Amino acid sequence: MTLTKSAKPLLHPDLELPAREVALRLDTDLEKGLRATAVVDRLVLYGFNELAAKPGKPAWLRFLLQFNQALLYILLVAGLIKALLGSWTNAAVIWGVTVINAIIGFVQESKAEGAIAALAKAVTTEATVVREGQKIRIPSRELVPGDLVLLTSGDKVPADLRLVTVRNLQVNESALTGESLPVEKQTHPLSADTPLAERVNMAYAGSFLTLLSLKA
């Protein structure tokens, strides 16, 4: 059983506090979870549990960036030299090749970005939470601070979580710490300045559970 401390990166994860005190600060119940009204209020206050998408470059800029290649610089200069020498046909051919190359690169890049965006929308991560005493399955983007999250082996951690109840829990945090071996988790309080790799009472978004046995 875990407690969502924040949908955003944690600045003060209250590592040194007992789980029940963290729950008290977040005004949540460790047995029944949040009330529906509290969930709505926190969604409005904190927003969705997702990273803000980086604004994409405008189409005209992406097209101009296709010319940002050493070979194309050479061709453009060669075309200019031909034009200055009066060889307009050769200059037009050289410039035409560079423009066609830029158009092809622009189209391919646009298709790739579109495919990635479509894939990201198609892959929806879900989380099991306890709200008002009921277990429900929701999209992970709808998690809010104070949510009680239930995890099982093989799950991807949907948000930065303060662990409340665990048994034989190991989490693969290699993407965060670079350590190849999974980390065994506990729930006891830690010093506030504990390094990330040693925060055994926390589970971070994007890591994976490799072993878990929870009390029913």
Image (cartoon, grey):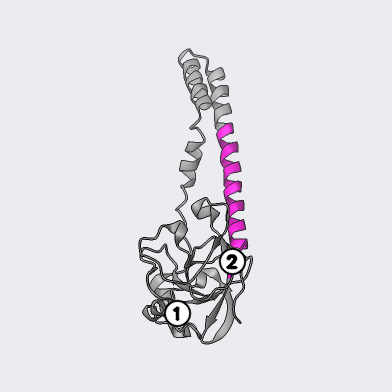
Residue 188, position as x, y percentages in the image: 45, 71
Q: Nearer the viewer, residue 33 or 15?
A: 15
Q: Please name the amino acid that badge 2 sits on.
A: Thr
Query: Residue 115, relative to residue 135: is it above or below?
Result: above
Specify few, some or many for label 1: CA neighbours under 10 Å numbering under 14, 14-19, or 20 or more: few
Q: Is residue 112 magenta?
A: yes
Query: Residue 179, relative to residue 92: is it above or below?
Result: below
Q: What residue span does the magenta drawing correspond to?
A: 101-126
Residue assigned mark 2: 125
Residue 168, position as x, y percentages in the image: 59, 69
Total marks in image: 2
Residue 49, position as x, y percentages in the image: 48, 67
Res 25 visible: yes
Q: How far apart are marks 2 and 1 (CA)?
A: 20 Å
Q: Which residue is drawn at 57% across and 49% down?
A: 113
Q: Residue at x 52, y 50 (%)?
A: 178
Q: Is residue 176 magenta?
A: no
Question: Disc 2 or 1, which lies upstream in sequence?
Answer: 1
**Residue 40 badge:** 1
